Image (spheres, coloured by chain):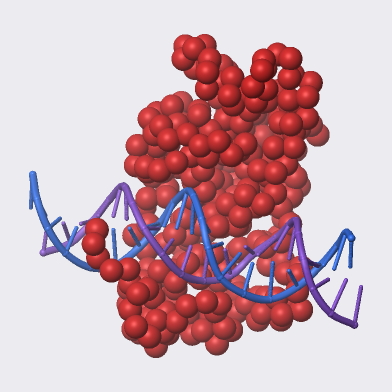
Chain colours: A red, B purple, C blue
DNA sequence: AATACACACAACCGCTCCGGT
DNA sequence: GACCGGAGCGGTTGTGTGTAT
């Protein structure tokens, strides 16, 4: 506290990374491995702050990142996990090793939030009468007697957990090849992406032992993300702040209940969507997530 | 063809946590 | 036990691109 942010230092470059900078960063990490980010700008000559370097690496340059469209299965998994874990994107990302937390967060904010909102609205039309004057389920939740909506939350949680377990216990053979997907937009973007892709290609086959998963939540000493996955309870206590629910309302409570609080409204409607086509995970983007890698053996770990 | 608007995504910022001293 | 610095996370913003008018 009170410390000036590292990026405030004079001469620190901000903004989009150039392919040259990417190359410098990648070749450095190739040599030294990720971690010790503080030393990266110094050792590479990059005029970037350590944070920026780490971000660039974890969100863009790290090998095995899948870009582009989210599959339906990924989408559903994200919705499930969001309901379970709230906006802990790093934790969610750990279940989708090919996606970065930033990617998932962006996708949630731009696509899924809207989608869920639409569905909620659709459900609201049907269930408007039941939801009384306010209409919004969130509101009804908020105003319902605590015991009542806690029970309801538990039902939701149970449902989500069950679905997630089902999803993850389905066949995961036929994994999608973790090749980098081409960027889909923009002439400039395409050029840039292709250069980044080339860089990524440089790294093909290079990955430190155990990196595959660990790196999704960071690297170096990064034990936090995995801890937050393994122990959602611990994690829930560790982060303060707000946990916006999918419909945009914000819940500030950060107790054990916070995980449940993030459950979307009109869950039954969402369930319809989430459960349709059987949550088949066999031919999806998370296909290379071995079940053994997913710390869901005992769902009670979540709570 | 030009302009306005909407969308997607990369990057930044501020905060918290954790390990070391 | 307190303090400090590095690392990581989540929210938000900025910017480039696509689409509609």
Q: In x, y percent, where is residue A105?
A: 57, 52
- Residue A95, compared with residue A245, is above or below; it is below
Q: In x, y percent, where is residue B14?
A: 36, 58
Residue at 47% x, 78% y is A14
> Residue C7: which quarter of the image?
bottom left
Q: In x, y percent, where is residue B9?
A: 64, 64
Would you say residue A275 is visible in this rendering? no
Would you say residue A193 is visible in this rendering? yes
Residue at 74% x, 19% y is A127
- In this orientation, which residue lies closer to the viewer: B8 or A98? B8
Report the number of discs: 0
- Residue A156, compared with residue A278, is above or below; it is above
| In the displayed structure image, the side of residue A150 where residue A6 appears, left or right | left
Quadrant (top left, top right, bottom left, bottom right) of the N terminus of chain A? bottom left
| In the displayed structure image, the side of residue A84 where residue A239 appears, left or right | left
> Residue A167: which quarter of the image?
top right
- In this orientation, which residue lies closer to the viewer: A162 or A136? A136
Residue at 37% x, 50% y is A224
Q: In x, y percent, where is residue A158?
A: 57, 22
> Residue B7: which quarter of the image?
bottom right
Residue at 67% x, 22% y is A135
Quadrant (top left, top right, bottom left, bottom right) of the C terminus of chain A? top left
| In the displayed structure image, the side of residue A17 where residue A209 appears, left or right | left
| In the displayed structure image, the side of residue A256 where residue A129 appears, left or right | right
């Amino acid at each position: 506290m009170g410390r000036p942010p590292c990026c405030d230092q004079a001469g620190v470059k901000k903004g989009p990374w150039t392919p040259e900078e990417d190359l410098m960063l990648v070749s450095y990490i190739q040599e030294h491995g990720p971690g010790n980010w503080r030393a990266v700008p110094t050792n590479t000559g990059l005029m970037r702050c350590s944070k920026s370097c780490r971000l660039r690496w974890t969100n863009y340059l790290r090998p095995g990142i899948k870009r582009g469209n989210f599959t339906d299965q990924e989408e559903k998994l994200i919705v499930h996990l969001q309901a379970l874990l709230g906006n802990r994107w790093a934790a969610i990302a750990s279940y989708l090793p090919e996606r970065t937390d930033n990617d998932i967060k962006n996708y949630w904010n731009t696509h899924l939030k809207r989608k869920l909102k639409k569905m909620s609205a659709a459900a609201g039309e049907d269930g408007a009468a039941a939801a009384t004057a306010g209409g919004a389920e969130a509101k009804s939740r908020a105003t319902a007697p605590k015991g009542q909506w806690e029970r309801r939350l538990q039902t939701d949680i149970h449902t989500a957990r069950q679905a997630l377990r089902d999803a993850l216990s389905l066949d995961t053979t036929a994994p999608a090849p973790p090749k980098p997907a081409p960027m889909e937009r923009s002439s400039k973007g395409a050029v840039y992406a292709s250069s980044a892709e080339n860089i990524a290609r440089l790294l093909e086959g290079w990955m430190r032992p155990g990196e595959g998963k660990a790196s999704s939540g960071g690297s170096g000493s990064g034990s936090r993300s995995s801890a937050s996955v393994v122990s959602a309870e611990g994690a829930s206590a560790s982060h303060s702040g707000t946990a916006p629910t999918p419909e945009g309302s914000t819940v500030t409570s950060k107790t054990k209940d916070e995980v449940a609080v993030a459950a979307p409204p009109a869950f039954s409607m969402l369930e319809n969507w989430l459960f349709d086509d059987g949550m088949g995970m066999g031919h999806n983007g998370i296909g290379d997530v071995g079940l053994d890698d997913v710390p869901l053996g005992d769902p009670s770990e979540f709570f």
